[in-house]
Amino acid sequence: MNNSSTVIQNITIVNEGSIFVSDVLIYNGVIQKIGDVPDSNGLNVIDGTGKYLLPGVIDGQVHFREPGLTHKGDMYTESRAAVAGGVTSYIDMPNTAPNVLTQEILKEKYHIASTKSLANYGFFLGVNGDNLEEILKTDTSQLLAVSDDGLYFTKKGNLLADNPQTMEVLFEKCKSIIAIHSEKEQIIEENEHIYREKYGEDVPVSYHPEIRSERACYEATVRAIDIARKHGARLHILHLSTAAETHLFQNDIPLNEKKITTEVSVHHLWFCNRDYERLGTLIKWNPAIKTEKDRDGLLQALLDDRIDIVTTDHAPHTLEEKMRPYFQSLSGAPIVQHSLAIMLEFYHQGRISLEKIVEKMCHNPAILYRIYNRGFIREGYFADLTICDLNASWTVGHDNILSKCGWSPLTGTQFRSKVTHTFVNGNLVYNNGSFDDTVMGQMLTVVAEKK
């Protein structure tokens, strides 16, 4: 059902640094009015009393696995999990099969999403040493970003962080954001050798943050920032994992003026190295979850605006793929369904405000990636909205995990807040556990930069 005309009445709105109670009228997919709507005749009415209305979350980094890896997840299943968690838009990474290294593959991926994705969608064009010419002949100003993330799984040497010569050329010529996975593989390989000498192939996963170490991250980030500044490039460091790196970023200018930006993924805020004993390879991510000090430092940098956005790096694998010995266990885990619940749990703990959550998960991704008319509750903007009950306790369990892989490192975790409704382009796609999958999301469009 296309819920083209809906009024949400008496709801507490969190938007652009303010919290206030109002009505919201949705008409023809956009926010028609924010204010008193006295006549609700002929409208779908939602009573928002006691609940909170947020702009839909924009997740700037996911791996939804389609095409080619759909035994783990696909655009339908993972977007379904996303909207159940209040995520209305996502940007998917290029490490599908085939890798998204050409315009043709990129176009095909957009076509697949138009038929399967319940949320709005955008895609990064992949970049490595082999397709640099393809990138440079593209009008990169029209792209959300180019990225090397995940491409190192295809073969060694695909990380830009290991290829300063490639970065020099790309950073000089590319007009879009260049979003990179910032770790030095040489340092990681040296560390792997040390631990293989001691443990063979069965290295305890607790050493993952020692192998994919702070030094591997920090040195890569310093070098990338230096080259980006040299060329005036727009560099975005993906999934920051160390407190040390946070001091490389500035918070003295507004986001829309920054050329060097970064993000934190929710698992680096939620877990720390003490959790490896309990969860093992289920929380093996690249870059690694590190120490409590790193976790706390990342949250502090998010609060003081050195870190610009919150993402998930949602990366489903089958349990069989995760439960292998350390070197064979695949890195990544599903988390897009639970990112907003995690951040709202921090709110309940008194560690972050609702306004800051909305800024980092909704407003700032739209600003950073120049996404047209999304990320804010404004009249005339697309009605991408999520309603949350901040006093509805629930527990993550096998019966409510929606990602295709069917598991979560958060199983057994109790959250105090729950998403009750999610609107995508004015369509009520998620309503208290029920889905309307008759209307697909839309392609994210980029606002042209002012000359």
Image: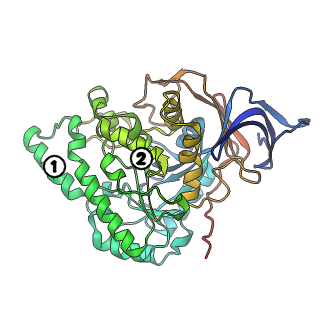
Say the numbered circle drawn on residue 191: 1
Please identify the quarter of the rendering in which residue 47 is found: top right
Residue 344, position as x, y percentages in the image: 53, 32
Label 2: element kind = helix
Q: Is residue 86 above or below residue 216?
A: above
Q: In which quadrant is the C terminus drawn?
A: bottom right
Choose between 143 and 209: the one closer to the eye. Answer: 209
Colour theme: rainbow
Please identify the quarter of the rendering in which residue 26 is found: top right
Of the residues tagged 2 and 1, which is closer to the observer? 2
Image position of 226 (left or right of 342): left
Image position of 135 (left or right of 84): left
Identify the amino acid type marked 2.
Answer: Ala
Whether residue 5 can be seen here = yes
Q: Is residue 254 above or below residue 344?
A: below
Residue 159, position as x, y percentages in the image: 31, 61
Say the numbered circle drawn on residue 427: none
Residue located 61% across and 46% down the image:
119
Image position of 204 (left or right of 379): left
Choose between 22 and 403: the one closer to the eye. Answer: 22
Q: Is residue 133 above or below residue 427?
A: below
Residue located 21% across and 52% down the image:
188
Q: CA distance from mark 2 to mark 1?
A: 28 Å
Identify the residue under disc 2: 301
Residue 252, position as x, y percentages in the image: 47, 58
Dot 2, how many residues are within 10 Å of its Cα: few (below 14), some (14-19), or many (20+)? many
Residue located 45% across and 49% down the image:
63
Residue 430, position as x, y percentages in the image: 66, 35
Whether residue 242 can be seen here = no
Q: Is residue 213 above or below residue 320?
A: below
Identify the amino acid type marked 1.
Answer: Asn
Image position of 429 (left or right of 162): right
